[in-house]
Amino acid sequence: MPDRWDVFLCHAWDDRQGAAAQLHDRLKAAGVSVWFSEKNVLLGTPLLREIDKGLARSRAGLVLVTRAFLRRLEAAGIAEKELSALLARELLVPIVHGTTYEELRDVSPLLGSRSGLSTAEDTMEVIAAKIRELVSIDAF
């Protein structure tokens, strides 16, 4: 595993085999290194500690905002803990999928105030290309 990742992918547990896996795969295909719990947390290791290491070793955060993610935030689970850590970062990109920025702002005004991307406007492939362009900027 790499010592550093370009991005940390925050998502709802319910999305791990659907939209989050699809975004992960598109990002990897675009050449972006991604910390993704489904790939980077080994069996038998403490989940929260592995997430903490992933957060510390990632240059930027991506939050896949789905209806499941919004429900998880209200339940104050692991997604909420990840988001709290990511909100302290300068570079955090919400990716809205199957919901709206208005619904996001109702649950998390801080995340909803960040400029981001939406699958209602771009395909996952286009979003991955935009993230690749973002992480390739030298100042980043």
Image (tube, grey):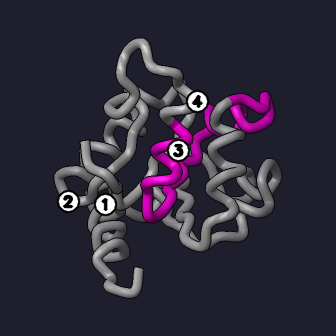
The dot on residue 74 is none
Q: Please rate how many residues cluster around mark 2, counting C-alpha atoms within 10 Å: few if below 14, some from 14 to 19, many from 20.
A: some
Q: Disc 1 versus disc 3: distance between alpha carbons?
A: 15 Å
**What's under tag 4, amino acid-wise?**
Leu
Q: Which residue is pictured at 65% across the width and 70% down the height?
A: 114
Task: Point out the tag, 4 or 2, that comes first from the N-terminus.
Answer: 2
Whether residues under marks 3 and 2 lie with C-beta atoms below 8 angstroms apart, the answer is no
For the residue carrying disc 1, how many other residues have a C-alpha within 10 Å: few (<14), some (14-19), or many (20+)?
Answer: many
- Residue 12, horizontal then vertical, whole percent: 56, 33
Q: Earlier in the sequence, mark 3 or mark 2?
A: 3
Mark 1–mark 2 distance (CA, rounded to whole Å): 6 Å
**Which residue occupies 35% across, 46% down?**
23
Q: Nearer the viewer, residue 12 or 121?
A: 12
Q: Magenta residues? A: 51-77
Q: Marks 1 and 2: CB-CB under 8 Å? A: yes
Which residue position is annotated with label 4?
48
User: Which element carries disc 2, helix, strand or loop?
Assistant: loop
Disc 1 target residue: 128
The relative height of residue 28 versus residue 45 in the rendered view (above or below) is below
Q: Which residue is mark 3?
A: 10
Q: Is there a contact, CB below 8 Å, between mark 3 and mark 4?
A: no
Amino acid at pointer 3: Cys
Q: Is residue 137 left or right of residue 1?
A: right
Q: Which residue is at 44% across, 64% downward?
A: 59
Three-letter amino acid code at the position of disc 1: Ala
| Disc 2: which residue | 30
Q: Nearer the viewer, mark 3 or mark 4?
A: 4
| Quadrant assignment for the C terminus | bottom left
Q: What amino acid type is highlighted by mark number 2?
A: Ala
